[in-house]
Image (tube, rainbow, N blue to C red):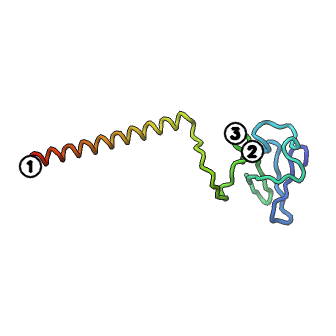
Amino acid sequence: IMPNGALIKLPGRTIAEGSLHVSEADIRRVSRIDEVVKVGDRLTLKVISNDLGRIKLSLRAMMTPFGRVAPSSSTKSSAPKINKEPVATQQRRLRKEARRLKIEEATVRNQQRKRGEEEKSD
């Protein structure tokens, strides 16, 4: 732990360390890194930069707006997927889909009616 961040030992590597800057520690503003991270904590971090062996890490990039750590895309979870669209966007999309289905249903009814009229005329 340092004044402006923390050095994080990366698993599976003997010498490699990454730096976690205080600005990348949390979604909300924190003045000191030890408000979020303690020595010995196991963290799920995202590599945001790897320039010439200097690995920059972010805990903030793994968080949702509610502060929870986002699930890793590499692990398969049985939990249902959460739709991240805003509610208004979801409602517009669903209304559009409903209109499309009504149009298809009306088209099918019209085609069936035309076939019935053609059969009657024959």
Real-space CA distance between mark 2 and mark 1, rounded to the nearest whole angstrom = 72 Å
Residue 12 in percent (x, y) is at 80, 65
- Within 10 Å of the Cα at label 1, are there few (<14), some (14-19), or many (20+) other Cα atoms? few
Q: Which mark is residue 62?
A: none
Real-space CA distance between mark 2 and mark 3, rounded to the nearest whole angstrom = 10 Å
- Which label's residue is closer to the chain start, 2 or 3? 2
Residue reaching furthest to the top: 88
| Amino acid beneath label 1 | Asp
Count of marks, rendered view: 3
- Within 10 Å of the Cα at label 3, are there few (<14), some (14-19), or many (20+) other Cα atoms? few
Question: Viewed as shown, does residue 118 lie left or right of 61?
Answer: left
Q: Quadrant of residue 102?
A: top left
Disc 3 + disc 1, Cβ < 8 Å: no
- Within 10 Å of the Cα at label 2, are there few (<14), some (14-19), or many (20+) other Cα atoms? many
Q: Which mark is residue 122?
A: 1
Disc 2 + disc 3, Cβ < 8 Å: no
- Which label's residue is closer to the chain start, 2 or 1? 2
Q: Secondary structure at mark 1?
A: loop
Question: Viewed as shown, does residue 54 lie left or right of 63?
Answer: right
| Amino acid beneath label 3 | Pro
Real-space CA distance between mark 3 and mark 1, rounded to the nearest whole angstrom = 66 Å
Q: Nearer the viewer, residue 33 or 48?
A: 33
Residue at x-position 26% and y-position 43%: 109
Q: Nearer the viewer, mark 3 or mark 1?
A: 1
Q: Nearer the viewer, residue 28 or 3?
A: 28
Residue highlighted by disc 2? 60
Q: Nearer the viewer, residue 118 or 89?
A: 118
Q: Which mark is residue 65?
A: 3
Q: Secondary structure at mark 2?
A: helix
Residue at x-position 47% and y-position 39%: 93
